[in-house]
Amino acid sequence: MSRSLYLIAGLLAAFAVVATVLSLLPAAHQPGLPAVASPWRTAALLLALGALASALLGVLTNLFEQIDRRSEERRLSARHARRPRP
């Protein structure tokens, strides 16, 4: 699950970079696109915030999966230690 969130974060960050570059280009190089740079800057900011939020969710998901896995291992080792040996 966390890998897919990392992938989404990477894609959103790449799109944010593209939107930032488009906001820095002069209007003559982008025919048919909005000449005003503020929509591109707004889109870049929103995409960057989405990428950061997705990366944070990925880190938290990975952390909780690790905690769950370790508690399960501890539970199984404690159960194995309590078994009487023949």
Image (spheres, rainbow, N blue to C red):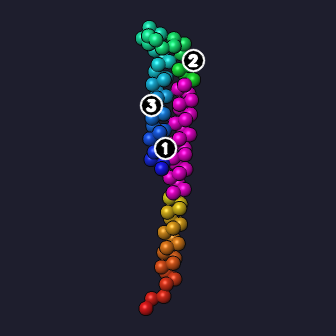
Amino acid type at mark 3: Ala
Q: Which residues, given as a range, are shown in magenta?
A: 43-65
How far, Cα to Cα, is label 3 from label 2?
18 Å
Whole-number angstrom distance, CA of label 3 to CA of label 1: 14 Å
Identify the amino acid type marked 1. Answer: Leu
Task: Please give the label number shown on residue 38.
Answer: 2
Helix, strand or loop for disc 3? helix
Image: 65 above or below 19: below
Mark nearer the viewer, 2 or 1: 1
Q: Nearer the viewer, mark 3 or mark 1?
A: 1
Q: Secondary structure at mark 1?
A: helix
Is the residue under label 1 in contact with that under label 2 (CB below 8 Å)? no
Q: Position of residue 28 (x, y in %)?
A: 44, 8
Q: Residue at x 48, y 23 (%)?
A: 19
x, y percent for residue 3: 44, 47
Viewport quadrant of the C terminus: bottom left
Q: In the picture provided, is 52 more to the left or to the right than 21?
A: right
Q: Residue at x 52, y 36 (%)?
A: 51
- Asked whether residue 50 is drawn in magenta, I would say yes
Q: Looking at the image, is mark 2 or mark 1 earlier in the sequence?
A: 1
Q: Position of residue 50 (x, y in %)?
A: 55, 35
Residue 26 in sight: no
Identify residue type, mark 2. Ser
Furthest residue in direction bottom, as rendered:
86
| First-in-chain label (3 vs 1) | 1
According to the image, label 3 marks what residue? 14
Q: Which of the 4 image quarters holds residue 11?
A: top left
Tag of residue 30: none
Q: Is residue 74 magenta?
A: no
Mark 1 lies on residue: 5
N-terminal label among 3 and 2 = 3
